Amino acid sequence: MSVGARLRRVRSAGCWKPATAEYLLRNALPRAVGTLPSDDMSLRAAAAWLGRAQDATRDGGISGRYRLADGWSSSYPETTGYAIPTLLALADVLSDDRYRERANRSVEFLLSVQLPSGAYPALEIADNRTEPSPFNSAQIVHGLYRWLQATGDRRVVDPIIRAAQWICEVQDDDGAWRRHFYRRLACTYSAHAACWLAEVAGDFGRPRFRACAERNLVWVLRQRDAETGWFDLCGFSSEDHRARRAHTHTIAYTLAGVLRISECLQVSEGLEAVHVAAERLLERLERSRTLAGVLNHRWQPQSTYVCLTGNAQLALLWLRLAETTRDVRFANAAFKAIDEVKSAQSITSRSDGIRGGVAGSLPVGGNYIPFAFPNWAAKFFIDALCAKRAWIDGWLNAAARPAADAVDAAAAPGVAMSVEPGPRNVVVYTTRISPKFAQLADMWHARGFQPTLVVVETGSASVVRQLAATVGLRPDDSVRICRRHGWRYTRVSTVNAPEAITAIASVEPWLAVHAGAGILRQPVLALPHLGTLNAHMGILPGYRGMNVAEWSALNNDALGCSVFWMDQGIDTGPIIVTRRVDVGGCRSIDELRARVDATQLTQLDSTLRSIVEDGVVPFSREQRAEEGRLFFRMHADLRSVLENRLRRGPKE
């Protein structure tokens, strides 16, 4: 970066202002989830900021952004348009009619800036009043239509129709928009313009609007990568398109648009395409524990900053899918994406432009709207918080589904295999602190079973201390257990380390047991003659991953456990046995988990005894990827929903 560019960045940061300097300092420091404001506090703060953004202009429009160095910018027609539904929602959610009046002021502003062609101008009013934009016009159509639905105000009917007609007129034959589009590029995020045409087509009796939306959907779906689920041409620039990358902002625009058109036109291909992409994004957020602001066609991070607008938009998309598919994993991802936005929001700043607003990027100097607070970031954040509230209410009030059946037997019919006599060396993989290993060790010692070698992962000292405090055991407890029973053990950094592989291979293991260690790689998995046994606190193949006992209970599905052979996937290896667990009477998550845990350990030990003492390897059956879903750590708000349900007990 040149010296001039650096100086311009320093000036854009506005760090000479005391309130701004304080915000910049706090923005640079990570915030723990436990210190985040409540949803209600964040919602009210963002709503108040949006109100101040409108008050900062004199024309009734909403200021496009607050810049740390230069303050409020001029009104932005596009985002003023799609803020109207948000203002109407705030009037209902907060029981405050002042937001309905703000929506009315926004409508008055938009009626005053429509062009003779019926189009609406691109950019902010200070930058452009005459150059039209099909994308921006469509967002305004959406806002005016919501106003019409809420109030019956017929003044907006003609502006809606004229704008929609113009959008159709400038569409290219292939379904894309290039004329008057941003940078004259054909972009798949145009689906977020076409969807509003599909929305209004029926009420206004305009089949042309529907046909226009349908052509765009066909074109957008042709740009989809069937292998990864990515939509090409969804970035801002030709460079983005060549690199097959995009901001989460325009990725979310693309997916939300495809979803809305597909729902309206009942296009199953579009619905499936959005579902696949939403899954990939969910996995990226969960695995990375953040969502990079720019991703490539393999959903890999391409930036070190977060696009906060994109987070809020994707939270909306995930919550919509959670509602339509009843897949709570989408709600879980949405809650985490919302938390990341909350972590960047200041609700105590002395600056009216900062307090309650949402920056373009986290950190604020990231390359998406750097050192500024765009009004659309606050708009989508408010929408996401309202959608989260509605989803939780809907989930709690929905009728409980009957629990799914589970098989209390071998995973599938088959014949067990007897093994030849000979040494049956068993290695065990665990960590310095492992309740699972501690309980298994008690079972083994009681009946005289002795593992050939216990491999103890040392792990991070701070993590070990934290875990020890959580479960009430001492660090290095696994080593103490081995010493007490006289079992051979070795300490390694990880089970996959070269020294671990050497130690395991030296005892020529016949069988391995996973008892609390980390993920195993192929070199370790290949060492035991028979394979590696593991137990899982869920009924496979349906429930894979983390917190599956909780997820099963939240979904009102049967709870249980499984014993399986490990492979390189997460809980995807061949299933030996499943057992259903009766959790009746459990009044907390801890009680529920304890009951399932006791059964899984008993079943794991029973399988081990069958193999080692009886020389009988039970039949197992392979899993197919599509048979189950991968679950991640449950968000605290969902845990609270489950805790409250358990505490109340079954309904009479």
Image (spheres, helix red, strand yellow):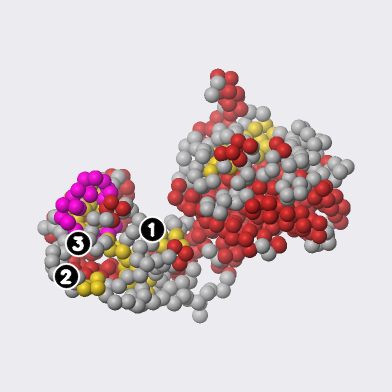
Between the residue at mark 2 and the residue at mark 1, the CA separation in whole angstroms equals 31 Å
Q: Is residue 335 found inside the magenta-colored segment of the image?
A: no
- Give the mark toward the camera: 2 or 1: 2
In this rendered view, identify the residue nearer to me: 279 or 69: 279
Q: Is residue 79 above or below residue 537?
A: above
Residue position marked by numbered label 1 in the rendering: 570
Q: Is residue 505 found inside the magenta-colored segment of the image?
A: yes
> Mark 1 or mark 2, which is nearer the start of the sequence?
2
- Residue 512 falls left or right of residue 153: left
Mark 1 element type: loop
Could you say where residue 42 lies in the image, as x and y percent from the top left? 58, 48
Q: Is residue 248 above or below residue 530?
A: above
Residue position marked by numbered label 3 in the rendering: 510
- Residue 36 falls left or right of residue 262: left
CB-based contact (under 8 Å), mark 3 and mark 2: no
- Give the mark toward the camera: 3 or 2: 2
Q: Which mark is residue 420?
A: 2
In this rendered view, identify the residue nearer to me: 357 or 573: 573
Q: Residue at x 45, y 47 (%)?
A: 288
Could you say where residue 112 lies in the image, as x and y percent from the top left? 85, 42
